[in-house]
Amino acid sequence: MLRIDEAWPTMTQHKRPTTLFRLAIFTTLAILVASGQRNTALAQANDGPWWKHAVIYEIYPRSFQDSDGDGIGDLNGITQRLDYLQSLGVDALWLSPIYPSPQVDFGYDISDYKSIDPAYGTLADFDRLVAEAKKRNIRIIMDMVMNHTSDKHKWFLESASSKTNPKRDWYIWRDGKPGGTPPNNPPNNWTSVFGHSAWQYDPKTGQYYYHRFYPQQPDLNWRNPEVEKAMFESVRFWLDRGVAGFRLDAIPTLFEDPKLHDAKVLEGTNAYGDQNQDTSLYDNLPEVHDVMRRLRAMVDKYPGDRVLIGETYLPNIQELDKWYGSTKHNELQLPMDMLVGFTNKLDANLIRQRIEDADTKVSGNQPLFVFDNHDNIRSWDRYGDGSHNEAIAKLIATLLFTSRSTALMYYGEELGMVTTQPKRKEDVKDPIGITGWPREKGRDGERTPMQWDDSNNAGFSTASSTWLPVAADYTAKNVKAEEGDPNSLLNWHKQLIAMRKNNPTLRDGKMEMLDRNNPSVLSYVRAGVAGQPAVVVALNFTAEPQTITLDPRTAGVSGDTVHTLLTNASSLDQQSSLADITLPPYASWIGSLK
């Protein structure tokens, strides 16, 4: 809600394999991984709950696969593509909202929490998706919006009908400031995330209602226990239907200052021309943690390690720790760590520090790293330099899948899909872009249809036109083309995910930074577990070659020779020493210690 070159393991006893032979080897490995087979060492690893080592793949259903030719993706389309997702190696699918909705915010304005929007299918289609995914060892995670509903939800329609309606207090209604004239005297100066006042005047009842997001998304009043009761019932509906958990949208925004004090005004203006504000009166208030503890207690009663994931844009690691429940571990299992993936610059010192914070300052809880989602410009564009984008994308993927974290990725990330923003205001679908144009162009650019092949509409739809146009590069950048290229970004992702699944060290090994003062190269070691060797990772964050010497003994790990497991730099295929390792620009290298 809130906004590559060579890539194959070295074979020391044989000549370098041909491209087709390498592809055959990799395909065999991917099939073994996808079918759930694990080596003996992995079986001995302390896996913990399924989500601890999961690769979670976000799908924006409107844009993934259209099965009925209407230009909009749907549930049956996702089911059709499960074999691809299995071959990629993902463990769970997070679906952005598929509930009935007026689609003002494309599903994040929910009008019924217990059904499926007809544009996406039916409850029967959903049940089939869950069942088919389960056959492939893939779980389904729903997106749950608890902060607000649609203004077309029956709760709000009742609430807005009169001041005396029993559901009036389910939302936040207030009189305007004294001395002013509606609709120009809102209760305070709070602004919406999506621009302008956070208060909407209702002439029928003569009061304003609060909306942290669009006016069509009125905030629920979580100080009313009836709201919690009703929302928890909605959660149970989907848990009973077999979902593996929930991603909780905009969850820090549940509570507001009950006295509605004016927010402190800060310097500057936002994309909509509003004065910037201190958000501490309506974001991340302490009361939200009481709700999270109660929600966690309810979810924990279900079998199968159901998981709660939070959309948690937070200012520092200390605040993130609170969302786990700190040492009590009784709130979210996986609040999203946005501090690592959204630095938006390849700064080795900064990212090193933030990874270490996530590793050591969240009370022993499991980090969840994310670099891409449906609300932000794709990482390809945020981190790319225009010349080395594919190498940088491989570097980010290496960091995501070899660090000690659960991994969250976004559809098309594995292909290097780019942000394709509208060029004219009249082409914008996202209301954010309509309101903020041209300074804010909206989020359409990161939501374009999935690129499956080089056919019409990239294989996404047979419609004459799709809800958003397909990106222009689809003829070269698509699943079919990249599956056949052993050096593609897609196959790089497959190799990394397969390695993560099969190597106990990359799953459970303690993570320690190496060469800590290097401003250009991020290096770390994962300590060996289950009798397996330690793994060393080195990532060149610059456009210049960098030569490093690594000493894992500084991290308490023994070993002075190394065997390359994976690299996109052919010059490192035969690397056997930890001394004088020369990394080409933006190179990624993973080695196994001996």
Image: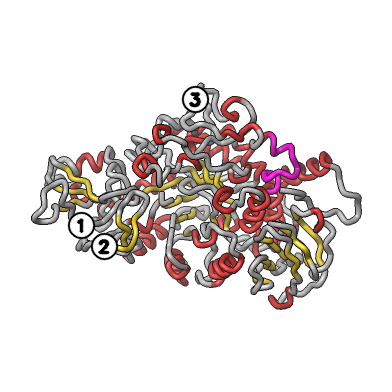
Q: Is residue 78 visible?
A: no
Q: Local crowd at mark 1 within 10 Å, few (<14), some, or many (≥20)? A: some
Q: Is residue 195 left or right of residue 73?
A: left
Disc 2 target residue: 263
Disc 1 target residue: 188
Q: Amino acid at mark 1?
A: Asn
Ranked by sequence position, the earlier of labels 3 and 2 is 2
**Disc 3, disc 2: CB below 8 Å?**
no
Q: Is residue 76 left or right of residue 11?
A: left
Q: Local crowd at mark 3 within 10 Å, few (<14), some, or many (≥20)? A: some
Question: Is-magenta flag for residue 483?
Answer: yes
Ranked by sequence position, the earlier of labels 1 and 2 is 1
Q: Residues under labels 3 and 1: Cα distance?
A: 44 Å
From this view, report whether residue 227 is shown above or below residue 261. above
* Image x and y of residue 445, in percent: 49, 41
Which residue is painted at 60% across and 51% down in the image? 384
Question: Is-magenta flag for residue 70?
Answer: no
Q: Which residues are magenta?
A: 481-492
From this view, report whether residue 52 is shown above or below residue 125. below
**Disc 1, disc 2: CB below 8 Å?**
yes
Disc 3 target residue: 465
Of residues 205 and 381, the one drawn nearer to the viewer in this rendering: 381
The quarter holding residue 113 reads top left
Q: Find numbered disc 2 in the image and state the secondary structure of the residue it sits on.
A: loop
